[in-house]
Image: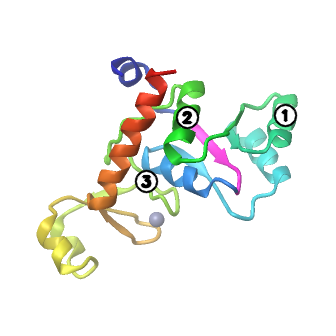
Amino acid sequence: MDNQRTKCNRNLRFIVDRMHGDLARWLRILGYDTYYSPSLTDYRIIQIASRTGRIIVSRDRGLVAWARRKGLKAFLITGVEPEEKLAELARHTRMCLDFDPGLSRCPICNNKLVKVDKDKVAGKVPPRVLEEHSEFWYCTKCGKVYWMGSHWRDILDRLEKAKKMISNY
Ligand SMILES: [Zn+2]
């Protein structure tokens, strides 16, 4: 696991097929610049990957084969649960599975999140959340505010599972 932490790669950029909206959100939470749109066609994915060097992530064997023939980096994902998909991808790319909110992107729009003071989010989050939490992150694009609520613990649990899958491989 220390190996994963010290040698993992923080500078990967992805493009994810339209079947993997959940994986796109996970990659963004982990801080990876991830292009995703539910209306992306295979042709458009190839086009964007050729132009930007983004790594293609897909469940479609045909698309992955097509991309590789064109000399593009493409990975076939077979897992079902997010932790399985992340483990598969991390095995291939040395992607980091450590969660650092300071690096996170907005799961909805891929924009880098900025840390904001508690008083800045008053009125934007439920009063109880404001009372119980001291750290908040904000997306300047969609305006959504994030904090380490119960689903963040779920994120950490799933990342631990993904790391275990890699070390057991
Ligand atoms: Zn956003």
Tell whether position 42 is magenta.
no
Q: Residues within 10 Å of mark 3 (few under 14, many from 20)?
A: many
Label drawn at residue 65: 1
**Farthest bottom residue?**
123
* SS label for mark 3: loop
* 112 relative to 134 in the view: left or right: right
Q: In the rendered structure, which amino acid carries the disc numbered 3?
A: Lys
Say if 157 sits above or below 126 in the image.
above
Say if 164 sits above or below 40 in the image.
above
Tell whether position 16 is magenta.
yes
Q: Which residues are magenta?
A: 12-18
Q: Is mark 3 within 8 Å of ligand 1?
A: no
Say if mark 2 contacts mark 3, CB within 8 Å: no
Q: Residue at label 2?
A: 12
* 116 relative to 111 in the view: left or right: left
Q: CA distance from mark 2 to mark 3?
A: 15 Å
Q: Residues within 10 Å of mark 2 (few under 14, many from 20)?
A: some
- Report the colour scheme: rainbow
Residue 152 quadrant:
bottom left
Q: Which residue is painted at 75% across and 47% down in the image?
A: 48
Q: Position of residue 65 (x, y in %)?
A: 84, 34
Q: Which residue is painted at 17% across and 80% down in the image?
A: 127
Q: Residue at label 3?
A: 112
Q: Earlier in the sequence, mark 1 or mark 2?
A: 2
Say if 140 sits above or below 30 in the image.
below
Q: Earlier in the sequence, mark 2 or mark 3?
A: 2
* SS label for mark 2: loop
Label drawn at residue 30: none
| Visible residue check, residue 9 | no
